[in-house]
Image (cartoon, rainbow, N blue to C red):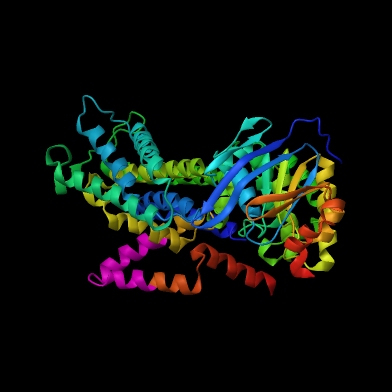
Amino acid sequence: MPQNRSDKPLLEARDLHLRFGGVIAAAGINLKVYPGEFLAIIGPNGAGKSTFLNICTGYLRPERGQVFLEGREITGLPPRTIANMGVARAFQIPQLFTDKTVEENLLLALAAREGFWRWLPLRAKDRVEEGQRLLRALGLEPFASFAVAETPEGVRKLLDVGMALALRPKLLLLDEPTSGVSSEEKLHVMDTLVQALRAQGVTAVFVEHDMDVVRRYADRVAVWAEGKIMVEGEPGEVLKDPQVLATVVGVEE
Amino acid sequence: MRWPLLLLALLVLGILPLFLPWLGFVFTLALAKGLAALGIALLLRAGLVSFGHGLFFGAGAYAVAFALREPGRGSQEATLLLLLALVVGLVLGFLVGLFVSRYRGIFFAMLNLAFSMVFFALLAKFYHWTGGTDGLRVPTPTVMGLVLERNVFGEVLFYASLALVIGLSLLLHTFLETPVGKALGAIQTNEVRLEYLGIPVQRVILLTYLLSAGLAGLGGGLTALAVGHVVPELAYWVASGEFVYIAILGGIGAVPGPLLGALVYELIRTFAFKYLAYSWQLLLGTTMLLVIFFAPGGIWMLLGERRQRVASK
């Protein structure tokens, strides 16, 4: 789904700055994310990729700069408010409710979107049906009644994304959706995920270390280095750039 | 299933006091503490321990005593008095909750303790209003307009408490199945994720706190009516600790747990006090050790496990 540049950006970051003590995490980040696109963020460890996601979701407050969602400023709003405005987030290490089953985790996320305060059971008929559709879309049906602690990492990753999708977000921020997943599982996880995202028409920004995944799934890629965006463009071109290869992929080669 | 067993327990609970009237009194006190322990159990689900619910228990009890002290102004009707105790618990719970719902862990526990100790001190020091450490007498109120003899009132109060507790248990049971009820456990396991789902965690805690305080207030009101006397000790930290003890003894996994815990606790206390006057805490301590080591889910879980084991054979 190639983006249309005449569209207004869904998310826009302007001149974000943030330091942790002496470590520079953001040194003037400017980025626009357009509706419908899949934008990959790549870069070495410590380049400030996760920090960017944390600023966009309100977990961190930038020292300088602003974040806009559909033209409305959201800088420094709490995560809960930003989530309710349509920005969902999935985590590098799955953030699940370990006291509950896979299905209950998803149902609670669905309830968060609608009817949370209503005096109806979590397992209300409509919600359970929607939950089952989502479980099927993610291929998690066989694990529905499993306690999350008993499931493999691939399942937990998908569930983590599923909970974000349950919110029917406009924008989904994914922090390394394939990290911790075995290489055999990787493509399966991404295929399932991308299919579910496309089906809902969700715009996605994902931090990724695997260049095969980036080439295969990203419409556009932004390269992070030392708190700045080094290059931005189509994966085919950007990943040929020798300077990019040196900073990002250099370690692997 | 534990439920047939529960039904049996309810039957025994309902019938025994007909033959042993003094048991009715013990059971009423147990149900009153059970209500407070239920409130504690709600908070424990979210991983929050309150060592200060004696505040609401005491406030409910004193509200009843104050209302009955002035026949001209206060109400004489038991049902209204219990409603008053509930409302006092809810209102105080809301006010204190606004403050404590921002805290977690040890700070939450200690802040609750602090509030309750301030209240305890006020009850003990403002002698002219509260009767100081002597407390206040609670005359027997009317029931639906009827003037009853003390012992008849005691019996009526027991059965009314039993009905009330059953009704509230069913209500709480459905509450725990709602998204808000389910979110309680999630607060303990992953509060950050709840925030990222757009759920206002602090408001969930405030609501739960308010409910728990209402339950404790009602329990205090029942105690005041049953005993016929209120003392500052109802709000003392030992009372608050009792509620936590009872909740863990009975088990927080399901609504009947804390109630069961309260019955066992009151029975142990009554008999142990009789036969082991100076060392009855030894029995309470040993019981708690056994529960923690062998049945961390409390008596309720123990019952379930035994039944399951039998069923699987």
Q: Of A61 and B197, which appears nearest the observer? A: A61
* Front one among B217 and B264: B217
Q: Residue furthest top?
A: B72
Nearest the eye: B215 or B105? B105
Nearest the eye: B195 or B250: B195
Residue B284 falls in which quadrant of the image?
A: bottom left
Q: Is residue B158 left or right of residue A150?
A: left
| Res A59 seen here | no
Residue A32 placed where, x, y %? 72, 39
Residue B265 magenta-highlighted: yes
Percent position (x, y) of residue B92?
35, 38
User: Extreme left residue here?
Assistant: B128
Work out whether B285 lies above or below A56.
below
Q: Which residues are magenta?
A: B264-286
Is A160 inside the magenta-drawn segment?
Answer: no
- Tell whether A130 sits left or right of A79: right
Is A79 placed above or below A158 here?
above
